[in-house]
Amino acid sequence: MNKVYSLLGLGKKAGYIVAGETGCIQEIKRKKAKLIILAKDTSDNTKDRFDGLCEKHKIKYICFGEKANLGKAIGKELTAVISIRDLKFSNAILNSID
């Protein structure tokens, strides 16, 4: 798990990451998101909203970590949703989780 958080920190510095519900929704609608990461302790309403959006726009999403840990990894407070913009980077994160 530590490798994933390290990758998220690198991705934030590289500009591959957008955090927060509003920014992630915009990324999905603009078709820039390649992967959505939802914190496991996110509310059911948020999970349902992103499940529907990702299904509609054919974007992969995963539930991983907790809001505090995801936020800390990217230098923010609590972060419920993260969007990854780069396909190769999103594949690296998925490979690290498995």
Image: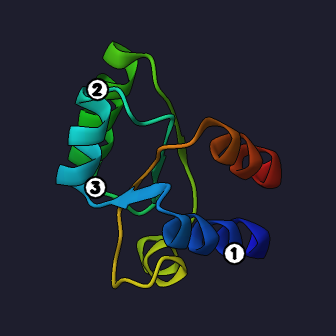
47 to 13, vertically: above or below: above
Label disc, if present, on residue 6 of the rendered structure: 1
Pick the residue in front: 19 or 80.
Answer: 19
| Mark 3 to mark 2 CA distance (whole Å) | 16 Å
Q: Residue at x 46, y 25 (%)?
A: 59
Count residues near mark 1 (Cα–Cα under 10 Å), then give few for <14, some for 14-19, many for 20+: some
Is 47 left, or right, of 91 in this rendering? Answer: left
Q: Earlier in the sequence, mark 3 or mark 2?
A: 3
Q: Earlier in the sequence, mark 3 or mark 1?
A: 1
Assign a secondary structure to mark 2: helix
Q: Amino acid at mark 2?
A: Leu
Identify the mark at residue 23; answer none if there is no mark: none
Q: Which residue is mark 3?
A: 43
For the point 70% across and 40% down, the residue is: 88
**Front residue of 58 and 11:** 11
As measured in the structure, the alpha-carbon distance from the residue carrying label 1 to the one carrying label 2 is: 27 Å
Q: Report, in whole angstroms, how far the alpha carbon at label 3 lies from the one at label 1.
A: 25 Å
Q: Is residue 43 left or right of residue 39?
A: left
Amino acid type for the residue under numbered disc 1: Ser
Q: Amino acid at mark 3?
A: Ser
Q: Residue tagged by mark 2?
A: 53
Residue 27 at x, y = what percent? 30, 39
Marks 1 & 2, CB-CB < 8 Å contact: no
| Image point (57%, 65%), residue name | 65
Which label sits in the foreground, 3 or 2?
A: 2
Mark 3 element type: loop
In the rendered image, the vertical position of residue 47 relative to residue 8, given as above or below = above
Which residue is depicted at the point 57% across and 56% down? Answer: 64
- C-beta proximity under 8 Å, tags 3 and 1: no
Q: Residue furthest left?
A: 22
Q: Nearer the viewer, residue 29 or 44?
A: 29
